[in-house]
Image (spheres, coloured by chain):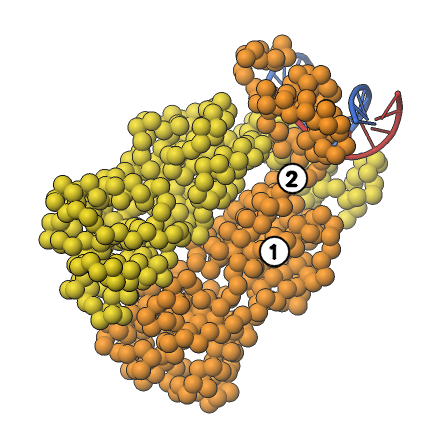
Chain colours: A yellow, B orange, C blue, D red
DNA sequence: TTGTAGGCGTTATCAA
DNA sequence: TTGATAACGCCTACAA
């Protein structure tokens, strides 16, 4: 297959361009471009020639050039604190899938849990000229807010709720989740409740929601163990151990995630304590295993998939000028009672 | 802040360009570009002027333009069958981290488990002109191989092993994993072994590795339950149930993943069977929970993090002309004996 | 150490 | 329905 390169760079086999295709098809580059991007503006026969020429040359469009000229990168930046987190990962996958359907590619960035790093990462990623940004949470550094606002990019914040998002939002109220869990535990009659909690901000809001309601119900001085991120089964075990060995009487523990809850249950069983007979365990997240664990784990279910789908859809719609009705979407949550409580 | 736009587009506030920065700094665009990309070629005072002008204009480089001109996109395409898989997700995170350190961004694509879709996705992503590609596994469609080979891009295949990779590779031998597991189980004296296995290709190779050795040891007609992807705790439970109810005598089960193993253990306990007393359980992957489960789960550990780190490093090195010694890196694996066997 | 000229591969725009 | 022309914003190569 002879390379039909222009004279100048006879050496390096550069990948074929629109011009190469046009030459081969006996058309102008513009017509080929049109055939690719607006086929309905091109005669069927021409389309056919273009198809043939593309196949023959092995042409692959250059979206760097295309994006530069059209000012449409078809790129969405997605920023999450970490990928290897059971809660986020389903959302990311949903985002990726739906964005692909809509013709966008996903640039995935990991920000860790500090606002400064998030700001650095987003400002770096803006040089790719993404057409939209997905941010996790509603807490961002002032610098990041400024950059994003002045960029006028569509932004979706996910996994939290506020009446005043940067732009759009899909999430739920962590405080209300906490309230609901606490109310439920009180109604079940638990009197000596302990907490095993990770240290991130959203979890802290859920904790506040829990404590507020417990206090309303005259339950004070709630023993609480704080464990570092990431939430892991081992920390659920050590958390319960600490709680029990602190000398408090405990008839129930509320955990900031199902993973911790699973750890607590395993530790309880290991010590010969029955769940929920001797000690009840409540989780959060409704992870895959919670339903099928033994005992099955009471928890709060978040539609993680929907968060991703909605975020991608809202973004794509806004980019394409289809203004959707709601800029703030509360997807709610559902408390699921199972065997562990 | 007056916009110093050129006359033509007085309307839309376009984001500032190198030229805007240059004007403000009283320099040429080229010098500003140099200050950004090769600061050591620029006088300190000039550098300072540039910094000031960038801050004042709020300049954000345009990597679409930069990439087009320099033919360096600083983009790496990463293709995995699914993100929400406990095995891949750590590797992806490691990839993302290390690539960021090296100055690359990650374009993450989900291919599912079919070769055709993988080929479609990669050929689409090539239009972003990535400088390297990470592919999961060593099975690819002929079309994809052709495209990749003719693109002359650095490619790293991960999570499997072959003496003849497309380009570079970091992984391990699934067959040898299977061999080792089977040998171990035989040495422990288990005679009535059942299998609970998912259906993906790499798992199938491990299964073959297991069966080969079992047959060598005169263990034939191994009862085996096949479960659909994704591996989930529930399928471990139902898998064991099927195995037990099929009428076979079972003193041990080997599972294609720790998640299935955990499910099997839970099901066993649920039925009043002791693990490993009545039935031993072997997993694969050494997931987070395996060590802290009760009983702790015997498994094979893969350094998932290292796969990502190495893949990113090999790619970056190759792109930057630092040829590394080994194009094929076998990271091996480690059988970890724990309580469940 | 800095600047000039030209081109990277595509698309918007307008003309034919 | 197709084509010519001029950007898009930056960098390579070379000149000063």
Q: Quadrant of residue B138?
A: bottom right
Comparing B16 with B108, the one in front is B16
Q: How crowded is mark 1: few (under 14 residues within 10 Å), some or many (20 or more)?
A: many
Let me know if marks 2 and 1 both belong to one chain: yes
User: Residue A202's spot in the image, x, y percent?
Assistant: 33, 42
Q: Residues within 10 Å of mark 2 (few under 14, many from 20)?
A: many
Q: Is mark 2 on a helix, strand or loop?
A: loop
Q: Mark 1 lies on which chain?
A: B
Which marked residue is nearer to the observer: mark 2 or mark 1? Answer: 1
Q: In which quarter of the image is residue A272?
A: bottom left
Going by the picture, which residue comes out furthest to the bottom?
B218
What residue is disc 2 on?
B73
Q: Are marks 2 and 1 in contact (CB under 8 Å)?
A: no
The residue shown at (22%, 44%) is A210
Residue B29, visible in the rendered structure: yes
User: Residue B172's spot in the image, x, y percent?
Assistant: 57, 67
The residue shown at (26%, 51%) is A224
What quarter of the picture does the C terminus of chain A occupy?
bottom left
Badge 2 or badge 1: first in the primary sequence = 2
Q: Mark 2 lies on which chain?
A: B
What residue is disc 1 on?
B311
User: Residue D14's spot in the image, x, y percent?
Assistant: 87, 29
Q: Is residue A80 left or right of residue B125?
A: left
Q: Is residue B33 left or right of residue A76?
A: right
User: Residue A245's spot in the image, x, y percent?
Assistant: 25, 62
Comparing A155 with B54, the one in front is B54
């Amino acid at each position: 297959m002879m390379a039909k390169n222009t004279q100048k760079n006879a050496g390096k086999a550069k990948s074929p361009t629109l011009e190469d295709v046009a030459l081969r098809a006996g058309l102008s580059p513009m017509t080929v471009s049109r055939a690719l991007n607006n086929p309905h503006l091109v005669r069927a026969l021409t389309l056919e020639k273009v198809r043939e020429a593309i196949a023959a040359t092995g042409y692959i469009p250059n979206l760097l050039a295309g994006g530069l000229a059209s000012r449409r990168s078809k790129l969405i930046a997605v920023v999450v604190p970490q990928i290897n987190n059971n809660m986020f990962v389903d959302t990311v996958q949903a985002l990726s899938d739906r964005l692909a359907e809509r013709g966008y590619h996903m640039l995935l960035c990991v920000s860790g849990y500090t606002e400064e790093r998030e700001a650095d990462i987003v400002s770096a990623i803006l040089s790719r000229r993404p057409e939209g940004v997905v941010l996790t949470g509603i807490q961002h550094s002032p610098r990041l807010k400024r950059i994003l606002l002045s960029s006028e990019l569509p932004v979706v914040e996910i996994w939290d709720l506020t009446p005043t998002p940067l732009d759009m939002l899909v999430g739920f109220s962590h405080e209300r989740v906490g309230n609901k869990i606490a109310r439920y535990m009180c109604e079940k009659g638990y009197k000596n409740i302990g907490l095993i909690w990770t240290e991130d901000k959203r979890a802290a809001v859920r904790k506040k929601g829990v404590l507020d309601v417990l206090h309303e119900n005259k339950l004070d001085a709630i023993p609480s163990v704080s464990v570092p991120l990431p939430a892991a089964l081992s920390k659920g075990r050590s958390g319960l151990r600490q709680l029990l060995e602190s000398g408090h009487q405990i008839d129930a523990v509320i955990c900031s995630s199902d993973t911790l809850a699973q750890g607590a249950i395993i530790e309880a069983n290991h010590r010969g304590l029955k769940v929920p007979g001797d000690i009840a365990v409540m989780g959060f997240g409704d992870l895959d295993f919670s339903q099928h664990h033994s005992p099955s784990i009471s928890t709060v279910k978040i539609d993680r998939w929907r968060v991703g789908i909605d975020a991608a859809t809202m973004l794509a719609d806004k980019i394409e000028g289809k203004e959707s009705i709601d800029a703030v979407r509360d997807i709610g949550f559902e408390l699921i009672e199972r065997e562990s409580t």
